Image (cartoon, helix red, strand yellow):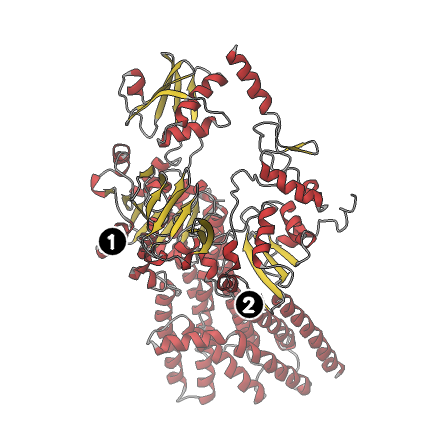
Amino acid sequence: MNQISHKSQIKKQKKTICFHCGEPCKDDQIRLAEKAFCCEGCKMVYSILEDNDLCNYYDLNTMAGVSQKDYSNKEYSFLEDQSVVDRLIDFTDGEKTKVHFYLPQIHCSSCLWLLENLSRLHEGILNSRVDFLKKEVSITFSASNMNLREVVELLARVGYPPEINLNDLEHQEKVIDKSLYYKLGLAGFAFGNIMLLSFPEYLGMNAKANTTLVYFFGYLNILLGLPVIFYSGWEYFRSAWQGLKQRHLNIDVPISLGITALFSRSVFEILTHTGAGYLDSMAGLVFFLLIGKWFQKRTYDKLSFDRDYKSYFPIACNKKVEGKEVSVSLDNIKKGDMLIIRHGELIPADAYLLDGESKIDYSFVTGESDLIKKQKGALLYAGGRQMGAAIEISVAKKVSNSYLTQLWNEDTFTKSNKVGEVSDLADKVARFFTWVILTVAFATLIYWLPKDMGTAINAFTAVLIIACPCAVALSIPFTFGNVLRIFSRQGIYLKNIHVIESLSKINHIVFDKTGTITKVNSGSVHYRGKPLEEYIEQLLFSLVYHSSHPLSKRIKEGIHDQLPLSVLDFEEVKGKGVRGRVEDHYVRIGSNDFINGLSKKDTLKQNVYVEVDGEVYGAYTFDGAYRQGLNQVLNRLKKWAGLSLISGDNDREKGILLPLFETERNLYFNKKPADKLNYIKLLQSDNQYVAMIGDGLNDAGALSQSNVGIVITETTSNFTPACDIIVDAKAFEKLPFIFSFSKLSIHIVYLAYSIALVYNIVGLSYAVQGALSPVIAAILMPLSSITIVLFGVGASTLLAYKNNLL
Amino acid sequence: MYIIVFLIIISLIIAIGFLLAFFWAVKDGQFEDDHTPAIRILFDDNKTKKK
């Protein structure tokens, strides 16, 4: 009887869903105006919107809200602290104040609508604008009507608590460099108009009959060409000059030579009325080069490649002062302060546990996957998350001196940029190129000088003009820029195009374990066996509810939406399972060995069997522990690269991992963040090109030290440590392609260079004879550039298609 | 024939006008967020005065 009533009760429960967020309601208790809510938080938000006539929110999208269940009442009193406020706001004139926040909850058009109508909730809000993709809202409020704390609290009240972390305090004004757009626009404008004015010349206008017109066109061209060389193209001269100062020939040297030759010869010809010049070619050249520059840039709204621990730490925490709780900003925390850390909150500094039972999730910081239990008096390292009831801690070290944050004092982090901003490949070619051009140009000059002074100068400049490595300079931006786009469509996000070159050289790959080759919180728990009635499920739920073993936790999450019953004689047998008596039923959950007395090992899969009153029902499988396709990924990579695993976790999974990595020599467990960094250094000192694949703060040092740092993340909006590549966990199986495709794209660039060479030989053969007419230059130069661009983009797209990357 | 000079000057002035319009658009940030305005335009202005 008891069982039946349980069942029907459960079935009825599942029917109602929350009007605000769409999550199932536990019971029908929370109601307002005939609408059911899953929690008080959701009801609160609804009532605020209802009172302010903002229910359009629900008309745009039904159940548009975000569940408020996990929403703890955050304290924002630290936002009264003027030093914090000053550093958070973007701009103020004493009255009008501008501020922007990151709101991770933004997900639909209702969010956008509500947040842009904030002014209807509070008269202090003057204006609010949302950037949907960045999930940011910029708010202008009047300082006399409300303060920053009230703004943040208003956002939190309607269900969008801003995420403010330590990094926000140090935010430098983000200046978006728009100059490239100006330069590009100007060059395009000049290119088009010069081309138009040069048309009569191409078509063979009778120069003798229309001298005034010819002069007019010429002078106008010079006028249009001036801003192209002195504004749009100026950065090439600057970069070439900087390279020369460091005795280094970069690709911009031959480009500058070419632009100078083009411009000076054109001006000379026009002013002396001896010809029409090549200004159209010059403007075109600069225009194409700038397009290349624009194309190779790719920014991802949600991603950031240079985060450090500051983006992970909160801005404030709760301090206990004379029995009362006040929230203080993190940089005001001193040694000896008493802090209160609640469920899910981060321990901001190394501290001693004073009171309460601490169960800390260090998975992100150390790679250890189990919760760590600590007793009173124990030292807790910063960065862990408290799970369970609130604890009281006493700060032992300042935030910046903590064990974890000290990692950032390593040299690795002060080094500016390991992946250079200049391409090695292009530089090598440029060096070779410059010498060849100069040799050919001077050889031509010396050959013609005794014969004819005019032809000598003519041929000399023509060589410099036609040999200008426009095509060479364009092949890398366009080919690699396209590869970047192909990758990003797969969920693989590269920091910039220079990463591709480094990728192609990798010969050793180091993996982290927790969160990298294993899933962080794999929800996929499958049950196989005799169907479980809801009541049986509840019995199992009750038993695992009391266990802190990670597998118990995952079974608990797998069942969810149950109420735990009381358990008698609860016992946890280490490494085997749990047993106990739940409402007169004897329940056991555990390994095959524990339940059936058999010790059979399942590779990569862990089975947990369940038994109620002596009857074995079936087993839960956790095939999600390792990422899908791990085996294939490692097998593919093994063929050409050395593989290592370095984990902060203990070695209990060694048996499973050994066959995958083949030798025990490359498996390292119980390693601290600094050990990981040193391991990468060791490999590099052995002339290895190392890629580190990790996920958490504990890998930050290794990621930064490695030649290419790759971060795997479940959701791209989450925190990711500084790295070169961010890979969406869904694209994990594509990992080998990142390397192989980078190698392919290098080959594409080489081929593009050969094509450029052919064009150059043709052009040079005209130039050395002193027979390069402006028309030939005007055709040959854009033609070679366009061929290279089409080839680079086309070939990389085709190869991606063949490799199923598109 | 010299009407061409006049016409070219006018055409250049118009072209410069477009160039300035482009500069203004860049400065105004029209190329920074191209997603949000697409959603924003779908909202009705005064739909909520029904209470």
The percent position of residue A518, horizontal first and vertical second, equals 36, 38
Chain letter behind tag 2: A
Above or below A291: residue A268: below
Q: Which residue position holds label 2? A: A178
Q: At label 2, which amino acid type do we have? A: Lys
Which residue is depicted at the point 58% across and 85% down?
A270
Where is residue A604, by image quadrant? top left
Q: Position of residue A63 (x, y in %)?
A: 63, 37
| Inter-mark Cα distance, 1 to 2 | 40 Å
The residue where tag 1 is placed is A678
Query: From the viewer's perspective, is the residue at label 1 or at label 2 nearer?
Result: 1
Q: Is residue A726 left or right of residue A60?
A: left
Label 2 SS: loop
Secondary structure type for disc 1: helix
As drawn, the residue found furthest toward the right would be B50
A200 or A470, nearer to the observer: A470
Give the answer, above or below, for where A9 lies relative to A248: above
- Residue lying farthest to the front in this orientation: A322
Q: Mark 1 falls within which chain?
A: A
Same chain check for tags 1 and 2:
yes
